[in-house]
Amino acid sequence: MRIAVTGAAGLLGRELIQTLNCVHVVLPLTRSDADITLRSAIFRRIAELQPDLVIHAAAIRDLDLCEKQPDFARAVNIEGTRNTLQATAACAADFAFISSDAVFSGTRSLPYGEDDIARPCSVYGQTKLTAEAIVSQWPRHFIFRLSVLFGNGTPNVIETILRTVASGRQYAAATDQIGSATYIPDAARVIEGVIDRRAYGLFHVCNPGEYSRFDLASLAVSIAGLPGSRVVGRRRDEFDGAATRSEYCAMRMDRLPEVGIQLPQSVESALGHYVRAFVL
Ligand SMILES: NC(=O)c1ccc[n+]([C@@H]2O[C@H](COP(=O)([O-])OP(=O)(O)OC[C@H]3O[C@@H](n4cnc5c(N)ncnc54)[C@H](OP(=O)(O)O)[C@@H]3O)[C@@H](O)[C@H]2O)c1
């Protein structure tokens, strides 16, 4: 397959390109190749590339930036997605949209499945949910909801935790913000498996297990053999961020087994792989 990937220079985009390159012809699209908010630019570029599939990973994913600049967030995350989808549809290609667990409000304490109703509590989450609705109008779509990403590539939250603690400073993490986490190489493998099967629709992709941000940071620090006392627990409302963080947004993966894809390894096991190979 010829697969174009937007957000090619980003954390997920880089790993997707590496994974898919082994079997497919991958066509990376960075912002300098085509700004997705410029309809004519993305139409022209996708028409030139004639892909069979476009994986749309480009987005503004900074929650606080989205909250402070909602028009900018909507322009990229909603209108940029609409432009990229329409350019894809004009080539009659498949479309895979990368979404987020931030579509869930976190007013419950059981993991959210793909069929659960999403009600975002942040501008970022709203832009992702609106974009999902637009994408679902194209029959040949995939939507992958990921949770907090970690893996090779900068910046990612686990890297920040390890570098902060290793430098002798404290790392503050919320004890009342619970969710899943997604190891980027596992996400790339799952996404490849789903698109190879042409199993259209909505998928949650994370590593099984739910953790507060504090517990996740403590686990990473403990695997790295660093002093756990440098991870400090705080309540969400003690942080300065403009955006409301969901109290609970852990995800369940009901659809992957239905299409014959094995669930990824546990968060603990994935963290072990990542942290043990991490060079401080
Ligand atoms: N990171 C997470 O924890 C996380 C969790 C759940 C879901 N996601 C979703 O996963 C996807 C990938 O996230 P990521 O962590 O890889 O993000 P990232 O590292 O910030 O990469 C996003 C990429 O999008 C590009 N981009 C932004 N605005 C653009 C525009 N107007 N035109 C073209 N390209 C543009 C950026 O280009 P520049 O480099 O030029 O700015 C960047 O390379 C996103 O859809 C995100 O919402 C991420």
Image (tube, rainbow, N blue to C red):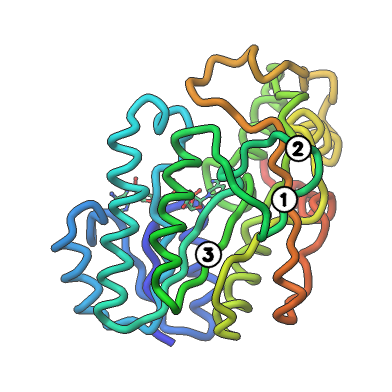
Residue under pointer 3: 143
Disc 2 residue crowd, few under 14, some 14–19, many 20+, Cα 10 Å:
few
First along the sequence among labels 2 and 3: 2
Location of residue 36 by image quarter: bottom left
| Residue 108, label in figure | 2
Kindly identify the residue that appears in the image at 18 percent across and 55 percent down.
38
Q: Is residue 151 visible?
A: yes
Measured along the vertical axis of the image, is residue 48 above or below residue 84? below
Give the image location of residue 253, x and y in percent. 74, 62
What kind of residue is marked 1?
Answer: Tyr
Secondary structure type for disc 1: loop
248 w.r.t. 35: above or below: above
Residue 151 location (% of width, % of height): 63, 52
Spatial CA distance of label 2 from label 1 is 9 Å
Question: Relative to residue 52, is residue 47 drawn left or right?
Answer: left
Residue 54 or residue 223, whichever sits in front: 54
Q: Are marks 2 and 3 in contact (CB under 8 Å)?
A: no
Percent from the top left, x then y, of residue 270? 77, 55
Residue at image location 67% in from the left, 39% down from the top: 158
Q: Are marks 2 and 1 in contact (CB under 8 Å)?
A: yes
